[in-house]
Structures are given as structure tokens and as C-alpha cells.
Amino acid sequence: MWPKRKILLLVPQNRDGWQGILSLLNVLHRDVIVRETSPEAIVDWADRTIPGLEEELYDVSDVGPTEIFYWPGIPQEDPYRQWGLSRGLIQTELTEFLHRYWEEEIVLPVNPKLGDNEPFLWRILDCAGFEPSLLWQTKEGQWEARINNGLHWIIPESWFTECWGHEMFGRRPKLVLAESCWVRQGDQVEFYSDKDRFEYLGEITPCADKALDDAVYTVMLQALQLGVPWRSIRRAYDMMNIRWYTNDMARDEWTGRAPVPSEEIEYLADRGVG
């Protein structure tokens, strides 16, 4: 007997990126069969493995899936979709599924270069107790999904661009320090809560790679705008093992900087994982 929900995931031949969807579905406790398809495909439930998929997650003695998720652009005339139509299976385009699943979430595409197994923004939010979720491809090429209690989802920007084009998922975050900024002052980088630089937050010593510096500062600024306190951002910066150091402890006592109003921050989600 098939489980109550058994998903057939249809992807085009020689198409990367579906492994991220598979990782998400697996962490949602969905049983999934993956089939690369084309107009000439023959519906085949024989036990076989697609490159990149370690093992098939179904028993060949079973009859078939209970619903179909298909990659954008796979037409209704596709042999597997026709097979599903003949059996009355629900068929959902993956963009529709992602819009529905992330409808109330804050989806944040990030630069995959800033982090190996965990991106820098995810570490900052996690360090601050925001309990962010993660869909990420590690430096070894393996996809990993983690669902936590927070509203924020951290996703590789390149995966969004390559797989979904200009599609936008989730909702816009409410910005707390919308006008925060950073400036270089000598050999330090200073952060302020306002563009006029009246309220000083802290400073860091940059690493040697200027191109990496700018990307790092952008992420730290993004975290400030999401309402992450400066101390949590600085602590996450310290923990990153890429020769980053902080140097603003001496100024903590006299700066008089304004704390981030915690009542304005949204970070926890009331949802299940099934």
C-alpha cells in the first residue's frame, strides 16, 4: 500500500536545482519519487536512480503516486502528467507549491559565497535567537533543509535566479532600522542606526578581501534592518573563521546608542512542519 501522500516530482532532463525541492519535501516528511521527463518519455516505475539521487524512496510493488509536483514549463501533454490525469491525481506546479508554503514566511535570498555549510545571515539570525529556517547547498554540493520556529527562510540567491527567475516568494519583512548604514573610518568600519550617523552602534576591523568586505557589510546591514541587535551581529561576525575581528568594546560604555526595540521585531512563526 502507498502512504497517504506520495509525490511524483517531475523535472526536465539534465536540469539541476530540483535537489533543493527534494530536500525540502523530505524534511516535510513527504515520500517522493523523482522522474526526469521529456515528450518522448515512457512512464516507468522500474527501480532506478537518477544521478544526484542516492536511492529511490518507493517500493516497486506499489501502484503509483498520489499527487504530482512538476517543474515550470512541463506541459500537460507530458507522458507522466497524462498518466496522472487518467487517474485523477492532483497536479501542482512547483512555483504554486512554494508560493503556498512560504506565503506567511520571510524568504531571504543570500549570497552563497558568504558561508560554507551555513550562510552568514543564517548564523546571525540564529545567534540572535530568531530561529531561522534554512534551505542550502553545502560546499560539497549536498542540499540540506532545516525547519525551525522562526519566520525567516535563508535560501541561496543563485538557486532562486537559476530556477525561478524573477519569481518572488513569501512576504516583505518589516524593517526596524530602515536607514541604518555603515561607513569606513580609517582602518575601521562603523555602523550607525541612521543615515545621518547620529546613533553609533559599533565597529569592526575588516578582513583583507575588499570584495568580501562589502558583501559582509551588506549582510550585517540587512540584519540590522531586520531588527537584530548589534551585539548578536558582532558575536556572529566574531565566530566566522575568515580573519574577522571586532574592536568596539571600549566604546560600549559611553556611546549611548539606542537599543533595538524588541517589540517591533517579527521573527517567530506559528506553523507546523508537516
Image (cartoon, rainbow, N blue to C red):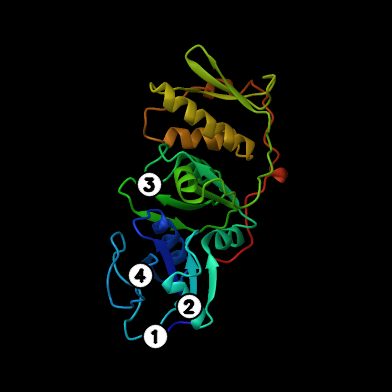
Dot 3 lies on which element? Answer: loop
- Residue at mark 2: 84
Which numbered disc, 4 or 2, marks the residue that appears first in the sequence?
A: 4
| Residue 174 rendering spot, x and y as whole percentages | 69, 43
- Residue at mark 4: 41
Give me the disc on residue 229: none
Q: Nearer the viewer, mark 1 or mark 4?
A: 4
Which numbered disc, 1 or 4, marks the residue that appears first in the sequence?
A: 4
Along the line of sight, which residue is nearer the eye, 140 or 202?
Answer: 140
Please indicate whether residue 254 sits to the left or right of residue 44 in the image.
right
| Residue 192 rendering spot, x and y as whole percentages | 63, 24
Dot 4 lies on which element? Answer: loop
What residue lies at 40% left-to-right and 40% top-to-bottom?
115
What residue lies at 68% left-to-right and 28% top-to-bottom?
179
Marks 3,1: beta carbons within 8 A: no
Marks 2,3: beta carbons within 8 A: no
Dot 2 lies on which element? Answer: helix
Label 3 neighbour load within 10 Å: few <14, some 14-19, many 20+: some
How far apart are labels 3 and 1 at the CA level? 38 Å
Q: Nearer the viewer, mark 1 or mark 2?
A: 2
Position of residue 10 relative to residue 142, above or below, is below
Figure label count: 4
The quadrant of the image that shows the N terminus is: bottom left
Label 4 neighbour load within 10 Å: few <14, some 14-19, many 20+: few
Dot 1 lies on which element? Answer: loop
Along the line of sight, which residue is nearer the eye, 238 or 183?
Answer: 183
Which numbered disc, 1 or 2, marks the residue that appears first in the sequence?
A: 1
Q: Amino acid at mark 3?
A: Asn
How far apart are labels 1 and 4 at the CA level? 19 Å
How far apart are labels 4 and 2 at the CA level? 14 Å
Which numbered disc, 2 or 3, marks the residue that appears first in the sequence?
A: 2
